[in-house]
Amino acid sequence: MTLNMGANALDDLLNAPAMGVQGLHAAYQRRQLRPSQVVERSLALARASEPGLFTCLLQERALTEARASDARWDAGRPLGPLDGVPVVWKDLFDVAGTPTTAGSETRRHAAPATEDAFAVQRLAVRGCVSLGKVGLSEFAYSGLGLNPHFGTPVNRASVDGHRAPGGSSSGSAVAVAARMAWIGMGTDTGGSVRVPAAFNGLVGFKPSIGHFDKRGVFPLSQTLDVPGPLANTVQDCAWVDAALRGQPLQPLQASAVARMSFVVPTNLVFEGIEPEVRTAFEQLLERLRAAGAHISHRHIAAFDELAALTARHGTIAAAEAYFFHQALVDGPQAGAIDRRVLARMVRGKTMSALDLLTLQAAHLRLRHECAALLGDAWMLCPTVVHVAPLVAPLEADDELFHRTNLRTLQNTLAGNFLDLCGVSLPMGTGAAGMPVGALISGAAGRDAALLSAAAGVEQLLAAKDS
């Protein structure tokens, strides 16, 4: 029998630190909770949430899927560890019957999607319950998560004012951090899964290019875009990974830290770092060494070449964003776009074919050079060199916004260009008690090994906190 617990007891249970997907699954097994009970609570929280967190609430669909999950659990035939788990979708993923707004006023009343995105279909087959679509930086083109059209989700870790949720997958991160959902599906073009994971104290998995099917996902950069999950644990992300690839959902085997090798870059990744973030990272290195990991410090020449290429030629994302949105950027609706996003898109207009082809050639060459440099080792650095900034100053000063955005993305952008798979793990707190993240990255195609390695480091960090 399901426990007839009050709202406060239910909140206490679901907000417990250990209540990730695995904990939720165990509570369903013990008949301590029912999926419909969890989903009804999530929907109530979503209805009461701030503007900008949800762009579309899928109440009827969510309740139907939750009741179907109830029936499977009652019959003793759940579909696996994801059955009855609430998930939210960054509003770039098509969900049948709803417009895909991409966080833009120009798409608020777009024609509804006729079918679910491939990823939505795959998680539905495993029993996930789709609560709704959530906010993002307009057209997914900012690492801070601010949105003037729908509203900016509130970073739940803020104690001294409204701090940025991180972007562009802002709503995906906040909904998980607020325990409305246990999986937040986002996309990552320059850090848009890893940055909000770091800002909100979550795990964020950015896979290699092509690792996940992105049919039905609204693009920013066809070359660099990758879907990826945000969740409470590496295991949660691994289950999503398996579901999206049509693989069995097996428990993740954590790699032994003592057998891991890490490369810490000596250039780029510590530029402008806040003292508290540096301290948290140095403490992580000390724990890894004590556990037997091999750590080396290396200058990464690809980082320097990428900086020179960007300064001279621009970025692949800017060129492809302008290509995709050219009619909008050059048309009468341009004034309806967030001015900060528009400024970034317009940069793509000034790029030549030579610029883009030079960048594309370097993208292919440097990803192979970086893979050869890393081999079986993992690159390790802070995910972001600062904690989530206060929103009000960013809204008041566009120059500050652009400087902060570049600083926010400096460590993650390189991973997209070099096609490094990466996991951001919570590694402590920085200024104002805000979360900070550690970024573990590996060569393209090493996604499965990366998740196992990240689980090993996660266990080491958990031992520190226990």
Image (cartoon, rainbow, N blue to C red):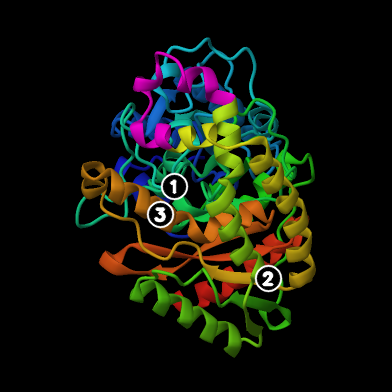
Residue beneath the point at 40% across and 50% down: 405
Tag 2 residue: 378
- 110 vs 342: above or below: above
Q: Which of the two discs, 3 and 1, sits closer to the camera?
A: 1
Across and down, in percent, residue 280 comes to 42, 76
- 69 vs 368: above or below: above
Q: Earlier in the sequence, mark 2 or mark 1?
A: 1
In the structure shown, which secondary structural element does the residue marked by tag 1 occupy?
loop
Magenta region, residue range: 324-343
Residue beneath the point at 59% across and 47% down: 313
Tag 3 residue: 200
Determine whether label 3 and label 2 are within 8 Å by CB: no
Rendered-image quadrant of the C terminus: bottom left
Quadrant in the rendering for residue 228: top right
Q: Which mark is residue 438?
A: none
Q: Earlier in the sequence, mark 3 or mark 1?
A: 1
